Each structure stands twice: as C-alpha cells, then as structure tokens.
Amino acid sequence: MIPRTPIEILHSVFGYSSFRGHQEAIIRKLLDGQDALVLMPTGGGKSLCYQIPAILRPGTAIVISPLIALMQDQVAALSEAGVRAAYLNSSLSFAEARAVEGAFLAGKYDLLYVAPERLMMPAFLDNLQRCKIALFAIDEAHCVSQWGHDFRPEYLKLDVLHERFPSVPRIALTATADEATKNDIKKRLHLQNASVFEAGFDRPNIQYRIVEKQSPKKQLLQFLQTEHPKDAGIVYCLSRKSVDETAAWLTQQGFHALPYHAGLTNDVRQKNQEYFLRNEGVIVVATIAFGMGIDKPNVRFVAHLDLPKSIEAYYQETGRAGRDGLPANAWMAYGLQDVIIQRQMLTTGNASPEQKRLEQRKLDAMLGLCETTLCRRQVLLKYFGDELNEACHNCDTCISPIDKWEGTKAAQMALSCVYRTRESFGFAHLVDVLLGNETEKVVRFFHHQLSVFGVGRDMKADIWRSVLRQLVAMGHLQVDMEAFGALKLTPKSVSVMKGEEVIHFRALRKPTRVTKVGKSSHAVRAQEMDNDANTLFEAMKELRLQLSRELSVPPYVIFHDRTLMEIAQNKPRSLEDFRGLYGVGEHKLSRYGAAFLKVVESHPF
C-alpha cells in the first residue's frame, strides 16, 4: 500500500519514528496550500518540512538552492530513499540538462533542485507554467537579505514566484536570521501573510570553546590529537595563504587535510570537496567560501583559527558540526590581531555607511561572545532572541569557569596611556609604554618621558594585551584603521577614567596547554557501546565505505553513523529487526539490509 499521510511517509521513506518540533505543523500548512517561513537550526530537520509535502502533493516541488554541493547531496540522499528527485545546475552537460528538463516536463519528479539563476531564465519560467508545481521551497533564505551574512543579489528576483504563481504554496527556510533579516525575508519574498515557525537556535550537542590565541597551530594540533585524531572536521582561516599553510602543516602532522578557497581552480575545489564528502576522517581547511549547504552529518568538529565577522557567521559555520545530533566541538583561537584585522576589513570595505554601522554592531557582538565570562550558549542564543534559562554545562565557561578580577585601576592606566600618546598608536606600542620598555619607537616619540611610562610594570605583557582587547570589546576603546590600527578613546571611556564605573576583566588562562574539556568521538561512542558493539560499528563503517564507492555516493547517504550505532547496539537478526531503526526506510531496507545483516551475523556475540 502506498503511504499517503505525513507520518507514513516519515516511517516508510525516511525511516524516522516521529516528527520533531514544528515539522508536522509546517508540513500541514504546505499540504493545505499555505505559505511558511521556517527558522530552524542546522541539523534540525528543515528539509523534511518540504520533502514530505513534495511527495504528497500533486506535481513537482521546485527547490531553490544556492549551491551545487547542497543539491547533489540532497538528491543523492532522496534517490537512496526511493524518492524521485533531480537537479539542474552547471555541473550537468547540455545533454544531461536536456534529459532532466524533459523528465520534469513529463512529470517524472517529486522534487527538482535548481539554482536561482536557472530559475530566472525565461525559458525555465515558461516551462514551470506548463507543469503542475507542488510547491516552491527557498532554501538558505537569509541570502535574500542585505542585512544577512551571505547576501546574494540573485535572490532578490525570487519575488517573481509570488507574482506568477500566486496559488502555489511557498516555504522559505534558514538556520540564521536576526529580526532585521527575518523582516527582510518576509518583505522581499512577499511572505507577510506566511505562518512563521521558529524552532529555537540551540544546538545542545555542540560544545562551544574559545581559547586565547598563543600559538594557534600548536593549540589546534593539541585539540585535534587529543579529541579528534581520526574525525572529519573543518578548520576555518581568514586568508587563502593561511589556508594553504595550515593544510600543508596538518598533513605533515599526519592528518589528511585538504585546502579549499576561491584562489583554487574550480576543478581542485570540487575534487577536494568531493573527497571530504565521500571519505572518512578528512579535514578541510577553508575560508568562508566552503561549507554552506554541506550535508555531511558526521562532521565532529569545526575549528576557527581567526575571528568570524559576526555571530551569524560563527553560528552558521559551527552549525556544520554534529548535524547527526551526536556530540561535536566548536573550537576557536582568538586574539588581538583578530580584532585589528576585522576592523581593517570593515573600514576598507565598499559597503555603505549604514551597512558598515550594522557590521560594526555585529562585530562588537562577536567580540562580546569571545570575552564573556557567562555561559557562551546563553550569550549566543540571546543574540538571536532565544532564551536559555540556565547555564548549559557544555561550553568552556561552564565546564571550566573563568575567574574575574576587579580591574578599574588597570583600565584607567590603559585608557590614560591611550590619551597621553595622543590616540595615535596600536596595541604593541601601548603595551611597551605601560611596561616601561625603552624601544626605539618609544624613545623616538619621547614616550619614555610620559607619566604613564612603566606604570604597569607589575603586570605581564599578555595581561596588558588582554586588558586592551577587552576594553575594545566593552566599547571603551575603538580601533581606528584609518590611523593604521591606533586605539582611540570612546565616549564610554570618560566614566572609567573619572572612576565612576567599576571594570571587571576576565582572567587570562594560564598559557601552559589547552584545557581538555571535550571528549573524543571514540570516547563518546565507548560510553554508549561496549567493545563488541564498537567492533561491529567499525566493521559496518567499512562496508558502508565500500558500498558508497561502488555507488559513487557519500557514505552518509547510505546510513548515518547514528544508524550504524543503533544496528551495533541492537544487533538485528533478521530484516524485520532492521525495520524501525533510525534512518532505515523501506527502500534502504530492501537495498542494503541483507548486506549489513551479513556483517552482524559475522560478529556473533
């Protein structure tokens, strides 16, 4: 019997036992022909919200997606589940594209994924009007907003869907949108009357950690060797040069690391991305050019060697870890130079004054997250208007609380030093003056004769750098990139210098070693599976990798790690025993069940 209800599709096609959060309500809206705007965290199950209605509604669902990798992943996963799906993008040859268009016109697909550029072609719009359209799904909808972190001009033209297909339901989906971005999405896509579903932004399986940058590569190496020696992950760097150097260095340290940035040829980028998706334990070192729409569920860590420009960007990038719901780490090393570089990028950019002011506020919020002594998850969620009533106990400031010290006098010394040096010098020079270092530059500008020269000798240089960095994050100092990174006072400085405001700083962690507050993925599995089950899990991973190479699909398209863990724990003895396990739908059961059953039978316990 063909399943005809959402829950039957969920069970038989996708192999999941129940809906999560707002999924069922969103699906019902689309089945009733109504529009929806969905804000749901990465890994929260957004795709099912339009995939199930696409299967149930007559016609073909058109999914507008910004990236080729996302389309390919989604279509591969749907095809493995027995769903009729295809994509149209520049990766297809002319003949292949013609074949897909012909099948689409013949009504042979439940879902067709297209790029916004393809959608806007007059010939394609004409074809849409000749076909029965089930719904339009606009993925990564924050791209429509100029206030978002990934604005794409071609998304602005998507209002044509409302104009030319007023009776076809539309769903816009994103994982990251503050209030301004959300309102922009509604306005630009004519979704003012759409039902809005906000699932909350919390990703409780991700552990957030930010460490003071000392020797970032060595800190990263210790993090990887201690917690992720064989795991897939992403390392983000700000520059292409840093990406290339870090990838080469990690390879020398015994990791399988590949670079990804816009300076590489399209062929190299595509090859490296495909290798990452289709193999286990690969690390991609990348600029922000990599990642949006990456569906790989078992990315166990995302590391940042440089500061992201906003909390939205940070949340989006760290959200690529742990999409399968299993424990994952978001690790970042952050220091003074990050502040200077981000301010420089902001100052020298071509954005309008209004856009620059917005980006300045976003950067200030990112600095605040780095410098907070509170639960990082609470600060992160509050930024998006979400609330966490109690500390998460799964971030570094919860697991290893940071001491605070009353630093009003130190703040006054630092601000006075900025004032006495005429707000014309950067971090390094100010620290030299505070410490009483008679450098050539200090003597040349006669700063060794100032009253503030040497007033901070009782504190070490790294503490003074931390003080200056935190004063910038608090808004008592600002970096003037037009004056080559000089620190300048702000209106907020006055109350501190007059002694009207008490300042508390976060204490600098001892620079001996990175504190291990996370667990390796192997250790996490060991908590849930005994030795026999873990042996079976590894054997099934080998089978999955073999099958994926034979079929030219990523391993997780066959089964997620979570599915293999359930098989290892439950040790099914028949195909019927497989039914009901996480992610095992009818099509996958008939296609792969017997092969995995043989592996289970070959490991009698």
Image: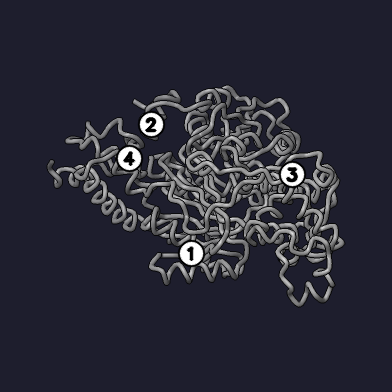
Q: 583 and 443: which one is in front? A: 443
- Residue 132's image quarter? top right
> Is residue 529 placed above or below 416 in the rendered structure?
above
Is label 4 in a helix, a strand or a loop? helix
Tag on residue 218? 1
Label 4 or label 1, whichever comes before in sequence order? 1
- Residue 157 visible, this angle: no
The crowd level at tag 3 (other Cα within 10 Å; few <14, some 14-19, many 20+) is many
Give the CA distance from mark 4 to mark 1.
35 Å
Structure colour scheme: one colour
> Which comes before the other along the chain, label 1 or label 2?
2
| Sequence-earlier tag: 4 or 3 | 3
**Taking 597 as reference, is 414 above or below it?**
below
Of 601 and 229, which appears nearest the observer?
229
- What residue is pinned by disc 3? 147
According to the image, label 2 marks what residue? 16
Q: Quadrant of the C terminus?
A: top left
Task: Give the numbered dot on residue 563.
Answer: 4
Q: Position of residue 432 (x, y in %)?
A: 72, 67
- In this view, the mark in front (4 or 1): 1
